[in-house]
Image: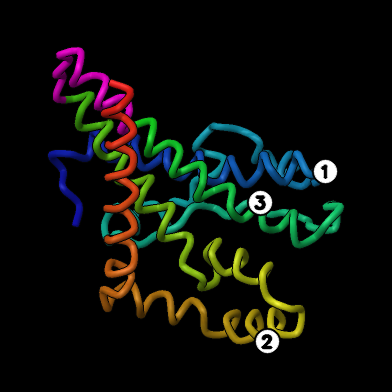
Amino acid sequence: MLDFSTLLFRAPALLIALTIHEYAHACVSDSLGDPTPGLQGRLTLNPLAHLDVVGTLMLVLCGFGWAKPVEIDPRYYKDYRSGALKVSAAGPLANLFLCFVAVLLMTARGSLGMSSAWVNQFLYWLMLYNVWFAFFNLIPIPPLDGSKILETFLDYETAYKYENFAGRYGFIVLIAIVYSGISNMIIGPLSSWFLKLCYGIASIIF
């Protein structure tokens, strides 16, 4: 639920996580020759270009939400499957990288004796939102990135059947696993493992 005492730190951290995720999708698709993200104004770090108001409020209030998806045209890719895989993975990977940066900054600040509670709160939420957003999006259920990643590893017939089935019932299944707590059972251990890895690397550096 919304915690007004930390909203000052959570809101910008959430906007950054959402923005970097969609911007990464747009950048990679653009680098593969697709002009669609650029034509639609998505090659920007301006949060307003990526923000879905309802999705963002849902994420803050309920822990389940979305940003405005980046539209792409895979016909511009030299290799459809390779291109689709790169574009789909770009968002979650960008979030994991930003999570690591947040951990690195927190560790560096601690080793240097810098103890601003405000900065630490912001970095804490930046870390949590990014690691959660990354692994949540890797769940292989439409419209999440994980479903598109999965399809690139399936043969065309199986991918078609999966897309047809998931396209009809994916959102219902997604809501069910979120509100049943199954998503937390998946994301929790993965997030803990990744954060331990980040802190381990950060402690070596600092």
Magenta-drawn stretch contains 104: yes
Q: Which mark is residue 87?
A: 3
Residue 143, placed above or below residue 95: below
Residue 166, placed above or below residue 145: below
Name the residue carrying label 2. 161
Horizontal side of 204 relative to 30 (left or right) equals: left
Element marked by disc 3: helix
Between disc 3 and disc 2, whose residue precedes? 3
Element marked by disc 1: loop
Which kind of residue does numbered mark 1 sit on? Gly
Across and down, in percent, residue 44 comes to 61, 33
Q: Which mark is residue 159?
A: none
Is the Cβ of the residue at disc 2 closer than 8 Å to that at disc 1?
A: no
Is the Cβ of the residue at disc 3 closer than 8 Å to that at disc 1?
A: no
Farthest front residue in view: 204
Magenta region, residue range: 103-117
Q: How many marks?
A: 3
Q: Quadrant of residue 58?
A: bottom left
Horizontal side of 171 relative to 38 (left or right) equals: left
Name the residue carrying label 1. 33
Q: Mark 2: give few (<14), some (14-19) or many (20+) Cα within 10 Å.
A: few
Which kind of residue does numbered mark 3 sit on? Val
